Every structure is written in structure tokens, then in C-alpha cells.
Amino acid sequence: MRKWLGLVLVMMICAFSLSTPFQTFASLPNEFRFFSGDNKQVHFALPVSAQVVVEHPDIVHVNGNAQHSFRLDLNNPFSLHSVSAGDTQVQVKLFGKIPLKTFQVHVEPELRVIPGGQTIGVKMKSDGVLVVGHHKLTVEGQKISPGEHADVRVGDRIISINGQKLQDIATVAKLTAEAGKANKPLQLTIKRGKQTIQVELKPTYDDTEKAYRLGLYIRDSAAGVGTLTFYSPDFGVYGALGHVITDMDTQTPIEVGSGEIVHTNVTSISKSQNGEPGEKRANFFENGKVLGSIHRNTDFGIFGKMSENPDYGMFKEAIPVAFAEEVKEGPAKILTVLSGQKVEQFDIEIVHTAKQSSPQTKGMVIKVKDPRLIEATGGIVQGMSGSPIIQDGKLVGAVTHVFVNDPTSGYGCFIEWMLQDAGIQLNRQQQRAG
């Protein structure tokens, strides 16, 4: 009899765990984040009533109720309405005594930004000079590289020579020539990953080039085309690209020394094909208007200061942004330029979203649905990175990468991580707890 009763009990537990009410209850989050003035729906789908206790009813109302404690029928959904910014706790108790669920609620002040979509030119100088290769000198009939012999490596960043901070390649050439003629070594300060090291390197006379050389190929700048994602008039900052700028030879991220973004004009587009991503071609205007400065180059793009909303955008007014957990599978729009400077809106679908509690680049998978965009570009092309993704009237993310074997699809990142790198912090409960 005990065995039969145990078996029945196990079957009842299994059946309950597969039931809709249990599945609904299990899917409820432990934390809610939303902006002041927003609402969240909560549905227990349980045929019972319960006592709801709100720690700070001046921050959140339940079903429009401003009381501290009251009863609710859990078979019907109820709403949390944010009244003011702050932290609070909402506890649901069965029979007024047994804790059933506790929600941590954090309400942010309202945050709005202006979506971009404009194609921009990026001009960036690195902090120091980047070593991208070793150059062989001809010395008494032999091929040697003094830099390689001194263990200066590809990917190293030379930030100063003899204590003088490097701003460009011309400074390296000048110091090299002076040290070579004086028959003295140079003291290089190098950043290698997170390490700072000192290297002594003596310039060597190249019999072929008739000049003193270090035996290094170096680079001090980068330029390209991308898309502006957002501008925040409240903070005077912008975000663009959605992914890090790396050196084309070493594939290492470029540390920003200085830089600017400027207006460009899209002249043509080479279409993406399976196995071969296309690209936007654009002209940098000579003496063109500078839109903003570049202060950071991170996994989520470039960020800096901007004083006004750039021209040629679709949006003149700011719109709300979405937290990462708000983004859902379904229809959405992207903003980008196909010709000239005109920003247009195109249909896409968000086919997958990742649950991310910390910054990660691949937040969503998107698929282009707009026939006109596919006809013009083949899908996603280089230069489209940073194109804003809008869903349900909110800015939710940016296009970051194309799938090489299916250019109609690609990755996007959540706007929350871009805002964070721009200096606009959207708090999480675990961050506050730390």
C-alpha cells in the first residue's frame, strides 16, 4: 500500500509540475526593472487569493492601489505601475502568512535617446603606435630585424620613447634618426595586453634604404565607415558601430588616443552574397562637419561626446530605451542609409534573444525581412553595423555582425550595454548589492 501511495504521490507531483499554473509560476522572475511611468504585468495563474505587501507604495502601485497591503485574486493578472525611481520589494503571501513569491523591484528614472541610423565616417588615432609586423633591414648583406631581435612583438603598443609620449609615426621616425646618428639605444615603453614593459632598442642603419630603422612596421590611425546608433541629448554622448574597432593586421582592439566621427555620403553598395559580405561605400567630405569626438573603443562600439542631434535622421525627438530582458522575439525595425544621407526604416525579425545578466556582444539573432533592403544590399553589409533596432516604439539594440553564409541574418547587441559603455548606467540588482 505504501508503494502504491508513493507512486501516486510521485505521479501527482509530476503532473502538477507539468501543469500550466506551475509552469507560469516557475517562469516568474525574481526581479523587475523598469522605467518610471512604465507598467509590468504579473500572472500567477493560481486559483487562490493572497495578501500582497508593497514595501514602498510610493515607488510602485499594484493595480493602481497605493496601499501598503491588500488582497488579490491570483487567478487574474495584476499590474505593477512605477510611480517614482527607487528600490522596493513586493511580497505575495498565501493566507496572509505563507510567503509564496518575493519580487525585487528597481525603478529607473525615465531614459530616452534619439535613434541614429546615419552613416558616419570614423577617424581615429591610437594611443601610441601599434606594431603590425617586423621589417627586415639589409645590414652587411644580411637580413635582420632589430625590433624582432629585441623581442618587440606584433600587437605591442609603443606608448612612449625615451619618456616622450607618442602621438604619431612621424615622432618615431624623428627619434629613431636622432638616436641612430648619436649611436644610442632607445628606451621603449610598451603595452602588451595588460602589462607595461620596458624594452631597449638600438636603431640600425639599413644599407638599402640609407637610413636608420627599428625593423618594425607600425600604424597610428584607423579610418572607416559605420552607423550611428543613438545620441543622448541629456548626457551629451553618442554610441555607434555596435562592435569594437580592431587593427586589420593584428586583430587587436585599437586603444583610442583621439578621434572624431564625421558626416559621410553613401555612394554605392556592393551586395552581400553567401560566403562574401558586401559593404557600403561612402565619401568623407573634405572639411566636413565633425559630429562628435571619440573617447572609447569597446566591444560594443565607439563612444564619445556630441553636442547636438546630427542632421538627416528620421527621429528628431528622443524615444524610450528597453532593458535587455524586455526584448522579445518578433517583428522589429532597423534604421540605416542606402544612398546619400537619407535614413530609412526597414522590417526585420528578432528570431532569438539571449538571457544576459552581464555585457555580452551576441544578444540577439536578427533576420532581414524587408524585400527592398534585401534587393539593395543582399541583407546585412559592412558599414551597417550600429544600425538602431527599434521594437514596440523603444530602442532595443544595434546590428553588429552578418552571418557570412546567410547575409540576410546576423547578430545584434542589446542597447543597454551600449548605453553603459557611453557612461549611462542602468543598474542591476546584483550590481547594487555589491
Image (tube, rainbow, N blue to C red):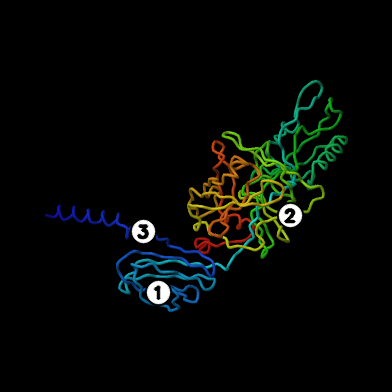
Judging by the rendered image, the residue that carries numbered circle 2 is 293
Please tell me whether residue 315 is drawn above or below residue 379 in the rendered image. Answer: below
Count of picture labels:
3
Q: Position of residue 416 (x, y in %)?
A: 57, 57
Q: Can residue 194 be seen?
A: no
Labels 1 & 3 near each other (Cβ < 8 A): no
Q: Amino acid at mark 3?
A: Ala
Front in this rendered view, residue 39 or 1:
39
Left or right: where does residue 215 sit relative to residue 385?
right
Q: Secondary structure at mark 1?
A: strand
Q: Type of residue at label 1?
A: Val
Q: Between disc 1 and disc 3, whose residue precedes?
A: 3
Residue 164 horizontal side relative to residue 9, left or right = right
**Which quadrant of the figure contains the N terminus?**
bottom left
Asked if one can make out residue 18 in the rendered structure from this viewpoint, the answer is yes
Looking at the rendered structure, the kind of residue marked 2 is Ser
**Helix, strand or loop status at disc 3:** helix
Percent x, y for residue 21?
32, 60
Badge 3 crowding class, 10 Å Cα cut-off, few under 14, some 14 to 19, many 20 or more, is: few
Calculate the distance from the C-alpha at mark 1 to the C-alpha at mark 3. 20 Å
Compute the Cα span from label 2 to label 1. Answer: 49 Å
Residue linked to disc 3 = 26
Q: Which mark is residue 53?
A: 1
Q: CA distance from mark 2 to mark 3?
A: 47 Å
Q: Residue at coordinates 70% horizontally, 60% vertically from top-left?
A: 309
